[in-house]
Image (cartoon, grey):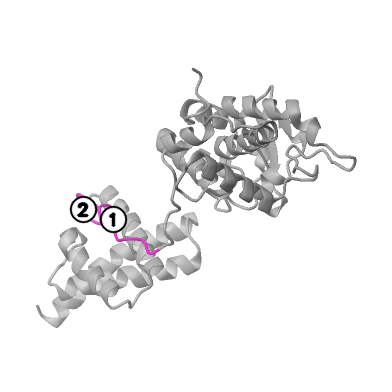
Amino acid sequence: MSGNHHASSLDILLDDLEAWLGILQSQRYVSEHTLAAYRRDLSKLANFLVSQGCEEWAEVDQDRLTAFIGPLLSTNSLLPTSIQRMLSAMRGFYDWLGQQGKVSYNPARAFKIKRQTRELPHVMDVDVVNALLDAPPPEGEHAIKLWIRDKAVMELFYSSGLRVSELSNTHLTDIDLNGGLITVTGKGRKTRVLPVGRKASLAIREWLRIRSEFIKADSSDWIFLSERGGRFTERAIQYALEAQARRIGIAQHLHPHLLRHCFASHLLESSQDLRAVQELLGHASISTTQIYTHLDYQHLANVYDKAHPRAKKE
């Protein structure tokens, strides 16, 4: 290929790229910083294509994409997040090229690399969670009372996906068992309203019937109390759950966050509604400026009622 032809092929490819970036810029879809990164990423791809004797974006297939990205991965010359951004740019660009009739398929859509993020938390199978929550009570009057409290705690963790700090700091006035709702204050002092499943409601009602037996003179209105009548602290909750798991014979290390993971995983598995699960968890990935009162609680409650293993009507 002659130098001039080489240059003209590159110019044609870059003209398409600039047209797409111009649209992104005018519609303010992405920041200037991201725009500059997309330009760098896709210019590299354009130069690579020309070096391979390609003249059109349509000549990129899975093999060519692998030939381009493979060396970047193997030499660690780019962070995994940078490669994900590069693929994101390619996906968007090729979607646009498809709309323009310049390509017939998007090679970046099917291209996957292993995300080098932290491992997903281990979760228990639904059957194991049910075995835990449906376990028979222990023997002895005092042990039974502790089980009633701890079962209510575990049911609420699994029903509503609370953080341990949220559950520990929940007051009697925060829960509406008739409406099946609980209001919790999470990270950043944000409150969210969560559905409480039928079995969790039953377990909490059973606990509230005996809660007065735990009250001491200086007890506050925390929903869950320690044996001494104070707030059921995060550490005490952790110990109590570990003890119940040992008693029942659950091999997996049981901690409050595990039940939150199970809540998220099992609900997502059933509902496929990532946004609703995100909202229910109160994750930081929801914009920090979002006002929680704008959420469609009815939609969340419907997703929950249909999908959560222990909320379904029998």
In the rendered image, residue 305, in percent from the top left (x then y), is placed at 52, 26
Figure quadrant of residue 298 = top right
- The amino acid marked with disc number 2 is Val
Residue, far front: 140
Q: Main secondary structure of the magenta part?
A: loop
Residue plotted at (15% across, 62% down): 63
- The amino acid marked with disc number 1 is Tyr
Task: Indicate yes or no whether the magenta region holds residue 110.
Answer: yes
Answer with left or right where residue 135 lies relative to residue 233. left
- Which secondary structure, mark 1? helix
In the rendered image, residue 101, in percent from the top left (x then y), is placed at 23, 49
Residue, far bottom: 3
Residue plotted at (54% across, 41% down): 247
Residue, far top: 314
Reading the image, the residue beneath label 1 is: 94
Q: Does residue 119 appear in this view?
A: yes
Do callouts 2 and 1 mark residues in contact (Cβ within 8 Å)?
A: yes
